[in-house]
């Protein structure tokens, strides 16, 4: 499920980048970045209709921080693809999430996959790569913002049970970047009214769809897994850049992209074999809890090896604390608040008592 969501995110984001870059002849990168956030904020706000009453200071800080990072990331990346091919810009931006993956790796195979992808990214920026310094600097800035975005998006996803947090973050980013875009490119938009339609398409493809998929993903997997899965983006970006914009990469650049993609494939192949309910702390959507003894606390049936674990199906943050909905291997349902069982539903009959 996670790879499919990530592939959808990457395809949407890179397609939006291609549409934006093709419009640079009439509308500048800053203007399109501002329109991207503004349209996204308006559309998601109309769909979500966020309720501001009752939000805590912590929720406001997280949403505003994410909004500021979104503004900086959009501006840096849209400026970067003005100087670099989309595949190269996507690879440089990936440096941020990959650095997080290296820092958060707990297994040798995780670390190896992240370092292999990191090697591919560094190959692009090494001396002799023949890339403009401005593009490299903007790509590095986008990478820093992307790393902060991953962390803050995950935090917002945990603090808000719905899409209110993302809606507020987009509104905040639009309030920061929108006026700058209006001042720098308002005349261009007035001269070319078709730019409004381009901005709407870019907002849907590059912001609304991928950011929503990101938040869905980061509620299910950790930042390490997210960063490695994101390593597929350079190959997709290079392919879309070639098909839509006729961008050609050098053999060295293709070699760097290949290293990054190989790292992602390696991670995806090794992950299922290494995962287990007892030791895998990355599978947040399938995290398990073990009963205190050898009997199910709900139906009191003896727990065998295959029924010993409770699998968490969903998790929500409420005013009462973190609420988890789990199901046991024996079929019993358990609801926990702050780790304590508050409600159960036995789906199997209790084991007969022997006297």
Image (cartoon, rainbow, N blue to C red):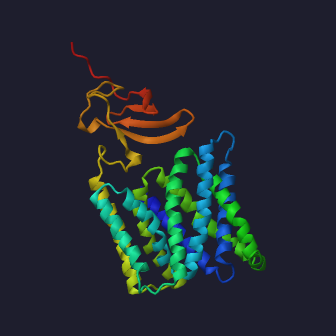
Q: Is residue 67 above or below residue 201?
A: above
Q: Is residue 163 visible?
A: no
Q: Is residue 115 visible?
A: yes
Percent x, y of residue 217: 47, 54
The residue shown at (55%, 77%) is: 81
Looking at the picture, tell me which residue is in the foreground, 190 or 104: 104
Q: Is residue 265 above or below residue 299?
A: below
Percent x, y of residue 192: 75, 79
The residue shown at (38%, 59%) is: 103
Looking at the picture, tell me which residue is in the foreground, 165 or 104: 104
The residue shown at (53%, 64%) is: 145
Q: Is residue 225 left or right of residue 355?
A: right
Q: Is residue 155 left or right of residue 223?
A: right
Quarter occupied by residue 271: bottom left
The residue shown at (46%, 33%) is: 338
Q: Residue furthest top?
A: 355
Quarter occupied by residue 255: bottom left
Percent x, y of residue 49: 68, 48
Q: Is residue 22 left or right of residue 349?
A: right
Percent x, y of residue 186: 76, 74
């Amino acid at each position: 499920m996670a790879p499919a969501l990530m592939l959808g995110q990457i395809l949407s984001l890179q397609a939006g980048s291609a549409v934006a870059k093709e419009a640079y002849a009439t509308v500048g990168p800053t203007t399109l970045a501002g329109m991207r956030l503004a349209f996204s904020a308006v559309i998601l706000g109309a769909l979500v209709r966020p309720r501001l009453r009752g939000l805590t200071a912590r929720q406001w800080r997280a949403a505003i921080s994410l909004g500021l990072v979104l503004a900086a990331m959009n501006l840096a990346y849209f400026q970067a693809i003005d100087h670099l091919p989309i595949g190269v810009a996507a690879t440089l931006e990936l440096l941020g999430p990959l650095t997080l993956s290296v820092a958060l790796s707990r297994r040798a195979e995780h670390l190896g996959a992240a370092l292999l992808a990191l090697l591919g990214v560094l190959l692009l920026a090494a001396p002799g790569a023949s890339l403009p310094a401005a593009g490299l600097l903007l790509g590095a800035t986008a990478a820093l913002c992307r790393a902060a975005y991953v962390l803050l998006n995950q935090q917002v996803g945990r603090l808000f049970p719905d899409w209110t947090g993302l809606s507020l973050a987009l509104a905040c980013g639009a309030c920061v970047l929108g006026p700058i875009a209006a001042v720098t490119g308002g005349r261009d938009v007035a001269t070319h009214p078709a730019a409004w339609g381009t901005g709407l398409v870019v907002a849907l493809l590059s912001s609304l769809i991928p950011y929503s998929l990101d938040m869905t993903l980061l509620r299910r997997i950790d930042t390490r897994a997210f960063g490695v899965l994101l390593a597929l983006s350079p190959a997709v970006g290079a392919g879309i850049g070639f098909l839509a914009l006729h961008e050609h990469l050098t053999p060295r650049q293709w070699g760097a992209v290949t290293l990054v993609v190989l790292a992602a494939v390696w991670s995806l192949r090794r992950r299922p074999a290494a995962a287990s309910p007892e030791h895998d702390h990355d599978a947040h959507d399938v995290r398990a809890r073990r009963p205190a003894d050898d009997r199910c606390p709900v139906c009191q049936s003896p727990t065998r090896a295959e029924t010993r674990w409770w699998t968490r199906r969903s998790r929500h943050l409420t005013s009462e604390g973190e609420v988890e909905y789990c199901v046991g291997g024996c079929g019993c349902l358990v609801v926990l608040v702050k780790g304590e069982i508050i409600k159960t539903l036995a789906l199997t009959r209790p084991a007969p008592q022997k006297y």
